[in-house]
Amino acid sequence: MHAQETTFNELVQGEKQYQVPLYQRTYSWQREELQQLWADVQELVEEQLEGRHPAAHFLGSVVLAPGRITAGGMQRWLVVDGQQRLTTLMLAFTALRDRHREHGAEQKAERIHDLVLVNKYRSGDDHYRLLPTQADRDAFTACVESSPRAGGPGNVGAAYRFFLGALAEGEENGGEAWTDAVETVLSGLLSIVEITAAEGDNVYRIFESINNTGVGLSQSDLLRNYLFMCLPTIGESVYRSLWLPMQERLGPANLELLVWLDLVVAGNSRAKQSEIYRDQKKRLEPLSSDEAALEAEIASLARRAERLMRILEPEREPDPDLREVLERLSRWGGQTHYPLALHLLDRVDDGQATPHQAARALAYAESYMVRRLFTGYSTTGSNRVFMEMPKEMEKDDDPAEAVRTFLSKNKTGARVWPDDDAVREAIRTRPFYKAGRSNQRFQVLRRLEESYGASEPVDYAKARLTVEHVLPQSPAHQWLDLLAEETEDGQGPEELHALLVHTLGNLTLSADNAKLSNHPFRRKQEILDFSALRMNQEIAGRERWGKAEILDRAADLADRAVRLWPGPVAGTAPVDDEWSGWKELRAALLAMPAGTWTTYGDVAALIGTHAVPVGQHLASKAGLHGAYRVLTADGRVSAGFRWPDGQESGDARTRLEAEGVPFDDSGRARRSHRLTTADLAALLGKDIAEEAEPSTQADDEQQAAAGRFETQLRDNQTKETLDGVLGALRFWEQQGGNLAYGMASETSCFPTVRFGSEPGSRALWPLAIYPISGTVEVVFQYLKRRPPFDDEPPRRELMTRLNDIEGIDLAEAKLDLRPSFAVEVFAEHSEEICAVLEWFAHTAALDEARRMADEDPGTL
C-alpha cells in the first residue's frame, strides 16, 4: 500500500472514476456531520478572506484499490474507505455549481461541472467521476445532472439541499468573494490522505481491518503522553498528585473538553477540538526542557479542572448569585457558554473580578441566547462569538460591561443581539414552540413563571411539568367556532389557529396535559385554576381564550421577557434591518425536497406572519429558489405566479410534476406531497416535537396513559375504528411487542420493539397513533437516526410495504419526515398493518443479533 497527502482537487484531476463497492453501506452522513464539516470550511473561508493563508485542515483518509482500466484508458478506483467524505465533497461542489448558475456565472459553473463532477467526453456510467452504490446512484446522478428530482428524499438529497442552504446563507453577507473563497477551500485546503492498495491486495480484507480496529488515542491521551515524556525525573510524582486526580474527577470526555477550553481561554479563539494535541504541543514546546514550567502548566490545568466542574455541576459553586445563573445556563444545555464561564471563574478565583460581576456577565450571555431564540436567529456562529470573548476582554474591565459591550458591537449576520422591539414583535407573532430545543423552551417558560414571585415556589424537579398549548394543537369544532369570530378578510379559522397555536402567548407549563387535552376552555379553566403556577391561574381568570386573549398575554410576557433578559447597549440596533422571517422563508424553500409543495399559510405559520404578506414577498422577490413550490391552500398554483425574467418558461405545475408532485384533473396538487409547518421546521433542523417520542414511565403511569389513550380514541373516533385499532394493538402485544405512550395532552401510542427490560434499553417504533386528530404518523424522521433504519433501503422498504395497503399514500419525498395516514385505515386494514409491524420487528431483531455478535462473536 502507498499513502500520500493530497487535496480534493488533486484527487479528482484527470480522467478517472471512483466507484463505491457493493459491500459498502449507503451514504449515511446527516445534518450533524454536515454541520461539523461546514463549520471547518467556514473557518478556513474566514481566514482566507482575511488574507491569513490558512493551513490545510485534515479531513481524513480515502483508501482506494485499482479497478479495471477502460478501453479508452480511464482508470477506475474502488473506494475501500472514505466514501462518506468523497460523496459529501462531490455534493458540496454540485450545490456550488448550481449557486453559480442561479447567479448567471455560467463559466464558473461549467468549470466545476467539467473538472470536478464528470468526465466530459465519457458517456453512461463512465460519465461520472464518482459512482455511488446502486441504492444512492439515482439520487446522486440527479444532483450532478441538475434533474428536476435533484435534492429529493434520502441522505444524498438532504446533503445537496444542506449545501444549497449553507451557501445561500453565506452569500447574503459575503457576496461573490465569499463564494469564491468557499471553492478555494473545498478544492485545495481540505487535506486528504490518499491510501492506494497494490494489485492483488485483498480489498475486502482491507475494508474489514479498517472498520474493525480498536479505539484510538484521544487528543488528551496524546497530550498526556507528550507532557510526561518531557518530565523524565518528576513525571511520576506530578502524574500521581496532579494529572491522575484531575483525570479521575473529569472522566475522558470532560478531560478532552478541558484541554480544548484551556486553549480557548488562553486566547486561541480558533482552537478545534479535533486538533487539540497539535495546538497544545505547539504552545508547550518552548517549555519542553523546563520540568518546573511544565509542572506549573499541569497545576494550572488542574485548577481549571476544578472550575470546569463548577460549570458542569453548578451546585459546587459557593456564591449563590453565580450558582443561580450557572444553573440556568446548565439547564439551557450545550457548551456555547463554557469558554466565557471558565474565563470568568478564572478571574473570580484570581481576585480580578467579583462573583457578582461574573454573574451579571453570564446573565448577559444568557440574554443573548434567549433573545436570539425568541427572534429566530440561527445558532450558527454563536460558538465562535463566545470563543472570541476571553481574548477580547481586558483584565481590568468590569467583566459584565465588557461582555455586554462585546455582544452589542456585533450588528450583522450570526451575531445580532435583538433589541426590545424585536423581542416584543417575535413573542407576539413567531411560533415559539418550534424554536430551539424542548429544554430551552421549557426554561424560558419556567423563568417567566418564576417572575410572578409566587409565595410558594414550584419544585420543578418533582412537578413533572411539560409545555401545554391552551388553544389545542388539534382543536375541536368549538375552538374553531370561537376563532371564526376573530378572523380577518380572506382568513379561515384554521389559518388563524395555525398562526396562534405555537406562539408564546398560547403556551404554559402544566403537569395535567393529559387532563387538559383539547377540551373546551371552560373545562381547561377548572383544571388550570387549581394549578400552583401563577401563569396558569392568570389564564384561568380569563372569560374566553381566543386571538385577543393570546395577543394580550403575549404583550404581558414580552414585558416580563425584556426585563428578565436585558438587551444590548442602547443605539446598537442591527444594521441589517431585513426581518429575520424572510431569511427563514428562504432557508425553508431551499430545504424542501424535490417532489413536495407547501402553502402560503404553512410558510406564514413557520415564520410568524400572515399568508398575504408571504405571497406579496414571493411575488416581489425575483429568483427566490423554490418559490414555485408554494401553492394556495387547496394545492393550486397561484394565479399571480410568474417566473422571473430570463429564467424558466412554462407553468409551475409542469415543473412540479417533473419533480414528482401529482395533480388531479382540477389542477390541485396531491395532499400527500404537501409539507406542513411542522415538516418545514423539521427540515430546518428544529427540534423534533415531544409528541414524536414516547416518554419513560413507571408501570402505573403506563397503565394510566393506556387508559387515557383508549378514552380519547373512544371519544373521538367511531366504534369500528376503536375496535380495529385496539384489536391490532392487542395482537402486537401477543406477538411479544410493547406499547409505549406519550405524555402530551393528546396521548399518542407507539407500537414498540424493545431489546432488554432494564430502563434505557434500546427501543424502536415505526408508528405513532394519535387518537384525537385521528392520524397515524410513520416516524421516518426518528428512524433515520436509529439502526438498522438509519440506512435508507430499510426505510424505503417500510414505506413500500405500507403503501401496498389500500388507503395509504406516503409520498417518497417524505422519506425523512413524518408522513401520516388516517387512523380509520389502520383499523380497517389491521391485519395488513400487523404484517408490516411483524416485518419491522423481524428486521430490528436481525440487526440486534448482528450487533450483539459484533460485540461478542460467541452469541451467534
Image (cartoon, grey):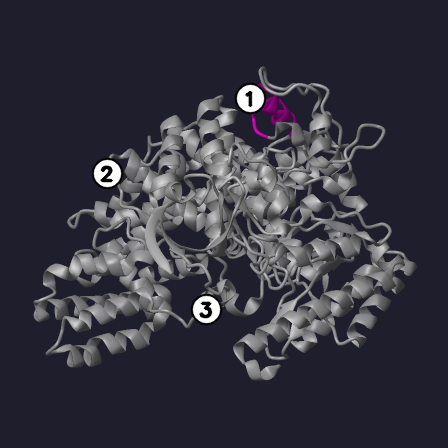
Label 1, label 3: how far apart the Cα atoms are: 54 Å
Across and down, in percent, residue 807 comes to: 85, 50
Q: Nearer the viewer, mark 1 or mark 3?
A: 3
The quadrant of the rendering that contains the C terminus is bottom right
| Amino acid at dot 2 | Arg
Question: Crowdedness of circle 1 by 10 Å Cα count: few (<14), some, many (20+)?
Answer: few
Q: Amino acid at mark 1?
A: Lys
First along the sequence among labels 2 and 3: 2
Regarding mark 2 in the picture, which secondary structure is present there? loop
Kindly identify which residue carries mark 3: 209
* Residue labelled with disc 2: 52
Residue placed furthest toward the top: 645
Outermost residue toward the right in this view: 720
Per the image, label 3 sits on a secondary structure element best described as helix
Say which label, 2 or 1, has the lower sequence index.
2
Q: How far is disc 2 from disc 3 in space, using C-alphas? A: 40 Å
In the image, which residues are magenta? Answer: 611-625
